[in-house]
Image (spheres, rainbow, N blue to C red):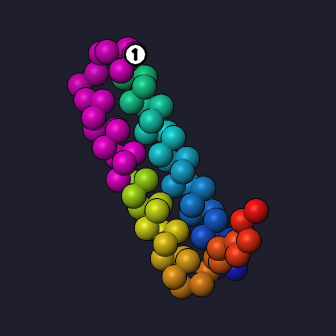
Amino acid sequence: MNLLIIFKVALVLLLLFIMFNLARALFILVKGESETPVSHFLGRRVIFSVLVVLFILVALGSGVITPNPRPY
């Protein structure tokens, strides 16, 4: 498989996991009855968001993806 496709699939899966954790935190916050605190899921979301940013920076540095040279 192409490395770019693997990168894109991994990035999409990480973003979906971030959205899943955000939805779980919202559900627990609204419902109010859970043994797991909301901060657990929000903290997980922050950690995976940092991981996504680092993943993109490593891919830019290694040349897997290239930035748009002319953004307008």
Residue 28: x and y in percent read 36, 23
Residue 27: x and y in percent read 43, 23
Q: What residue type is labelled 1?
A: Val
Evaluate whether residue 4 shows in this view: no
Q: Which of these two is toward me, 62 or 32?
A: 62
Task: Give left or right: position of 40 versus 6.
Answer: left
* Image quadrant assignment for residue 30: top left
* Image quadrant assignment for residue 25: top left
The secondary structure making up most of the magenta span is helix
Q: Quadrant of the N terminus?
A: bottom right
Which residue appears at 41% of the width and 54% of the height? 48
Residue 44: x and y in percent read 34, 46
Task: Give left or right: position of 48 versus 11.
Answer: left
Pointer 1 residue: 30
* Range of residues picked out in magenta: 29-47
46 is within the stretch colored magenta: yes
Q: Which of these two is toward me, 29 or 71?
A: 71
Which residue appears at 39% of the width and 45% of the height? 45
Image height check: is 50 above or below 18? below
Residue 59: x and y in percent read 54, 76
Q: Quadrant of the C terminus?
A: bottom right
Query: What crowding class fits label 1: few (fewer than 14 Cα within 10 Å), some (14-19), or many (20 or more)?
Result: few
